Amino acid sequence: MGKNTERTEMTEIKTEDGNVRVRMAPSPTGFLHIGGARTALFNWLFAKHHNGEFILRIDDTDTARSTDESMQEIFDALKWLGINWDKQYVQSERRNVYDKYVSQLLDSGNAYHCYCTPEELEEIRAQARADKQPRSYDRRHRNLTPEDVARFVTEGRKPTVRIKMPDTPIHVNDLILGSLNIDPATLEDEVIVRSNGIPNYNLTSIVDDAEMQITHVIRGTEHLNNTPKQIAIANALDLKLPQFAHIPLVLDDSGRKLSKRHHGDLVAVNRYREQGYLPEAMLNFVARLGWSYDDKQEIFSVDELIEKFDLARVGKSGSVFDIKKLEWLNSHYINQLDVASRTDAVIPFWEQEGLVDSDTDRDWLEKIVEAVGERLTTFQGILLQTRYFFTDDFEYDAKAVKKWWGSSDEKKQRAREILTNLGQILEKIPTFDLETVETAIWKYTDENDIKRVAAMQTMRIALTGTSFGPSLFDIVVLLGKDEVLKRIEKAITYL
RNA sequence: GCCGCUAUCGUCUAGGGGUUAGGACAGAUGGUUCUCAGCCAUCAAACCGGGGUUCGAAUCCCCGUAGCGGUACCA
């Protein structure tokens, strides 16, 4: 890229054992969405590229919102993507670790108890905003007298713990954004332990990053504002800092950050799995959101991604999630698969609809898949393409009927005639194979001066209800003589 | 309100002091074919604005503007 002249050089090796170590730290408050998948992927690629370690850390300090179910979903999504992790931690099991550091902070005077009530805080905030102050909390409990404390305690107030922010600027060398200086006047004395005693994100995150010897924190830019807070905490604790790399957000088509709250499971990774997307396609797609290699390559295998991934080629601006491109990649990867694999992938979708069961002839199914060819953008798309193979219970598409069967009496009569003739011809065919069927039909159209398109589309609608799909000869042969004649009869009656 | 980040075709992006500003997805048109998809060919489509610096700025600097993110006892 070359445009990040301000970017600091990355220190190659940082842990005691000389490895790169990164982590993905989701909070289990919902499914893994596209943005989370990309964060995971970037971390994982970075780790793999450097022969380092990728850690999965469940940041579940928000006990009110965290669920086991969500944790399981995140595991499933990552496994499906093929993003494997070397170690796994759950923050709720590490309370003693955090408590130790909090005591240290309290003892050293770098943190203090705050007895403000939520209502009081709300007032302070409103006032600060009205006064156009750069920060809201006025640090009023920084220096409480023992009398004050005693009073609050008798009132039954449970304190939070706040970190004392320094009055000197904090400097961040972000691997993607470059050099940043934060004015201490804007720094909030952040709550690091809730009144229920559970520490929260800014404390646990940076403590764990140090404890786990994380060398690089690669996360979304929504965390950029947390970085100085975490640096302050680490400094107060004399902890070693990781290097930070804030990757730009993944946005929806109106430019907003993708989130569970606003987009629901439309952006859930598992949803794409259910719809018949391939993990390779998802990985390839998501990798190119914010990262690029050169101006030539769009298709990257996982191995290539590992080999070529580099934080220096991650851009600074957000990228819009464009499903059309995902679909294009998905069809590319689907078409890469042989017929047997594609059949395997598609069978569950047929089964779900009750079209196929374990008794259905496998060879026949493979032939159907072969006939469908490169028409799939997702495996789920097989239903739209092939439903009529399994049932004649379908509607004739209105637009197709209007165009090829016609609405006037003469046109309908003409369609009936074609269908009748075709039916008679097919009935007489001794061996119902591709070549014979094709020859017979072409003979009919050419000798009777009927447009091939007209005859074919007229029959296609009778057989499938639609005006699109695989080669009609394939359909005829796969359906078999009896079924074809039956459907022609049915169409003639309908007309 | 306050703090911060960002800004190249509709989208993902390449480029990064002198280029016909390149590619891909999507779109349009034509060709191939029984349709659709595909494939092939072609077309349309961008440097947010204003000031500097410079012989020369999309590229460097400043100022705007806009968008987004944060502003929680969420992460």
Image (spheres, coloured by chain):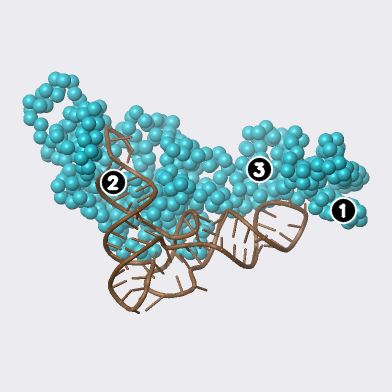
Residue type at tag 3: Ile
The N terminus of chain A - image quarter: bottom left
User: Which residue corresponds to mark 1?
Assistant: A450
Q: Residues within 10 Å of mark 2 (few under 14, many from 20)?
A: few
B74 to A287, vertically: above or below? above
User: Which residue corresponds to mark 3?
Assistant: A382
> Disc 2 to disc 1, how far (Cα)?
72 Å
The answer to whether tags 2 and 1 share a subunit is yes
The chain in brown = B
- Parent chain of label 3: A
Chain-order first, disc 3 or disc 2 = 2
Of discs 2 and 1, which sits in the foreground? 1
Chain-order first, disc 2 or disc 1 = 2
Frontmost residue, A320 versus A429: A320
Residue type at tag 1: Ile
User: Which residue corresponds to mark 2?
Assistant: A225
The chain in cyan = A
Q: Residue at x 14, y 34 (%)?
A: A140
